[in-house]
Amino acid sequence: MASQRSTTSQATTGEKRGRSSALEMGPRKKPFVGCYNARTSQDPLVHHGRHFGRSVHAFCNVQTLVTNGIALMSEDIDVNDESLTAIERKEYGVFKELLRMIPSMEARLMESSEEMVTTIAELIQKGINGARADDTKGVKSAIIDWITPKGQSLNPHIPRNVKSGRGFNHGRTGALLCPAGLDWANMETRTKLVNGQIQVAGDQWPIFLYANYTYDAEDPWNGLLRSGLLVSAFKHIFTSPSSVDQEPKATR
DNA sequence: ATCCTACCCCGCAAGAGGGA
DNA sequence: TCCCTCTTGCGGGGTAGGAT
C-alpha cells in the first residue's frame, strides 16, 4: 500500500520524514464502516482497541500510527534504529505493541488494501474512544466516594452525576487539583486559581498525584503517581468498580 | 432459572475548529 | 457569521459471565 511517509505535508514530530505523529490526536476523516455485526456483536478489533487504549496508549491516532508503522516495517527499520527521533521510536514501539496484542494483526495489515487498513484503524480507534468514554463516565460518579473523608460528608454536597461545581470551584476538589508547590490554604492563591489569574500548565502536577497528597519540593519525584486516589481509579478501570473498596462482587 | 455486576453500544447534544 | 465536520460527554439500555 502507499506510504504516508512521503505524502503528508504535516510537520509535527515526524517532520524530518514528513509524517504526522500518531501519539497526538488529530481529526478523524470518515465515519466508521465495516462493522462485524451491526446489531448484536462488534468486530473483535473494537474489543482489542478497548484493551489497547486502556493498557498501552489512550490518546493516539490509530490511523496515523498504523500508516507510519507499516511504512517503517516495510523498509525493515528496527524500532531502535538511530535514524529515528526519540518520539518516532516511541511511536514505532507503540505500533509494535499493537501488533503483539492482536493475533495475526501484522499479517493482516501487510496483506490489506489501503482502504482495509483504514477500516481496521477505525475499528481499533472506536474501541479506544469507547473505553475511555465508559471509564470517565464511571469514574465521574465513583470518585465522589473516594474523595469524601471517611465518616464525613462534603460541604457543599457534590452530586454524583454533575461536574459543574467541582474543580477549583469546590474546596475539596480544589485542594486535590491544586498544583504541587502552591498552597491551597492560601486564600490569595485559591482566589487566583478560581478566577483564572493563575493558569495551570500541563506540566504542573496536581497534588492528588502524590502519595498522601504530599509534595516534596526537594525531591519532586518522591511519591509521584503513588496516591491512594490513583490506586482507586486504577482498580475501578482495570479490575472492577466494586474492587475499589471491597472484594469484587463479580468475577467476570 | 434468576439475579447481580460489568461490559459495551447507541443516539443525542454541545462545543471546538476550520473553511467559505 | 454561518455552516459543516468531528470529538467528547452523557443517559439509557441491551448483553453476557458468574454466582446463587
Image: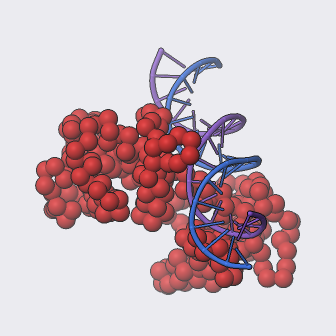
Chain colours: A red, B purple, C blue
Residue A22 at x, y percent in the picture: 36, 50
Q: Is residue C18 above or below residue A45?
A: below
Viewer-closest of A218 and A64: A64
Left or right of A25, for residue A117:
left
Left or right of A191, for residue A180:
left
Q: Residue at position x 19%, y 65% from top?
A: A80
Viewer-closest of A129 and A44: A44
Q: Residue at position x 50%, y 48% from top?
A: A42
Residue A81 at x, y percent in the picture: 16, 61
**Quadrant of the image for the N terminus of chain A?**
top left
Residue A167 at x, y percent in the picture: 70, 60
**Which of the 4 image quarters holds residue A52?**
bottom left
Left or right of A168, for residue B8:
left
Q: Residue at position x 41%, y 64% from top?
A: A56
Left or right of A237, for residue A194:
right
Toward the left, the furthest residue is A76
| Residue A96 visible, this angle | yes
Number of marks in the image? 0
**Quadrant of the image for the C terminus of chain A?**
bottom right
**Which of the 4 image quarters holds residue A89?**
bottom left
| Residue A12 visible, this angle | no
Q: Residue at position x 66%, y 82% from top?
A: A247
